Amino acid sequence: MASIKDVAEYAGVGIGTVSRYLNNNGYVAENTRRIIQQAVTELGYTPNQLACNLARNKSMLVGIIVPDIEHPFFSSFTRYVEKHLYDHGYKALICNTVGISDREKNYIEMLDRNIVDGIITCSQILDNSLYLTTQKPVVALDHYFSPDIPMIYSNHKRGGALAAQLIAEAGCKNVIQFMTPSSISTPSNDRHSVFMDILKKRDICVTSCESEWNVFDYNYLYETFKKKIESSRHIDGIFAADLGAVCCLNILQEKGISVPSEVKIVGYDGLNITNYTTPKITTICQNIDRLASSCVDIVLKKINNQTDFPSEIVWDVAVKKGGSI
């Protein structure tokens, strides 16, 4: 196997010149570049990626921290992030924190030890200090840590208003909304406060049911939502994230309750799973691709010590009509 020394000898130049050409980190005359590339091609030389990255002082890796990769929102977001990173010559290192444990703390400590160039987090963590002490560039999806950590999120207030409008226009009078814990510092909970405020002004009863912190398992959601639905009387409307909306639809159909004639359902996220139910679920769509691309753009700017980016980016949401309302 050819070495960088072999390439230098074949091209008649110094090893340092070949290194500058391969790493693109210094001047090399155009004619010399052509000679070196010819030597690389004819010798079949493959640069050592680790050595190249060390020369650049970069790993070309970005860590993605997600609460549960099995959850369809986080899996979709991670898919888009990985794609956009790859398009920029970076690879993704996915860290799946899964539930209530020290996994997120352990992952942050690992990523901080020069393994990655930056971090994109979808954290639902309650202790913000874990991210405030890391030395790596961090970008957050839907979580406020500090002014120094840019946050990307959807216009959740508008999303809550759109959902409330759908529920009110459908004539619902007794509504349950299922939500993540209000203690989490996330703008995504704004949709629930706006949803409740608008409907209460219209004399529509709204009951909020918070799920357990950092648990996204379908079976847990199913059992939790089932108990709440069974203990509530005269429900005619439900607002929940898409996975929860699917849970509710299944629960209601198993109990012989018709959707939408007896109970209306509005989801939130705009995931593909809303297309696979009967009826299809009406949902408020987040632009997950745009959320992902913004996270990638900003983390790469931070990695390259650029400062021309905002501390917040907000993407609009839209209604996708189904047959659940």
Image (spheres, rainbow, N blue to C red):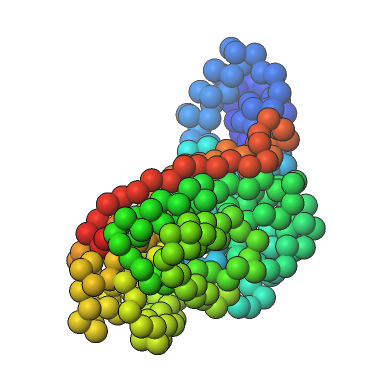
Q: Nearer the viewer, residue 35 or 190?
A: 190
* Left-right relation of 110 to 288: right
Residue sitting at 67 percent across and 75 percent down?
102
Quarter of image, res 166: bottom left
Q: Is residue 209 above or below residue 136?
A: below
Asked if residue 72 shows in the view, the reply is no
Residue sitting at 71 percent across and 55 percent down?
145
* Left-right relation of 240 to 194: left
* Left-right relation of 174 to 101: left
Q: In this view, does 274 lie above or below 57?
A: below
Residue sitting at 38 percent across and 53 percent down?
165
How many numbered discs, if any?
Answer: 0
Residue sitting at 65 percent across and 13 percent down?
29
Residue 266 picture location, percent across and down? 35, 61
Q: Which of 192 and 267 is in front in this view?
A: 192
Residue 156 picture location, percent across and down? 51, 52
Q: Is residue 231 above or below residue 170?
A: below
Q: Which of 40 and 276 is in front in this view?
A: 276
Q: Which of 105 and 89 is in front in this view?
A: 105
* Left-right relation of 54 to 290: right
Residue sitting farthest toward the right:
133
Asked if residue 35 shows in the view, the reply is yes
**Quadrant (top left, top right, bottom left, bottom right) of the C terminus:** bottom left
Residue 131 picture location, percent across and down? 73, 59
Residue 52 picture location, percent across and down? 65, 40
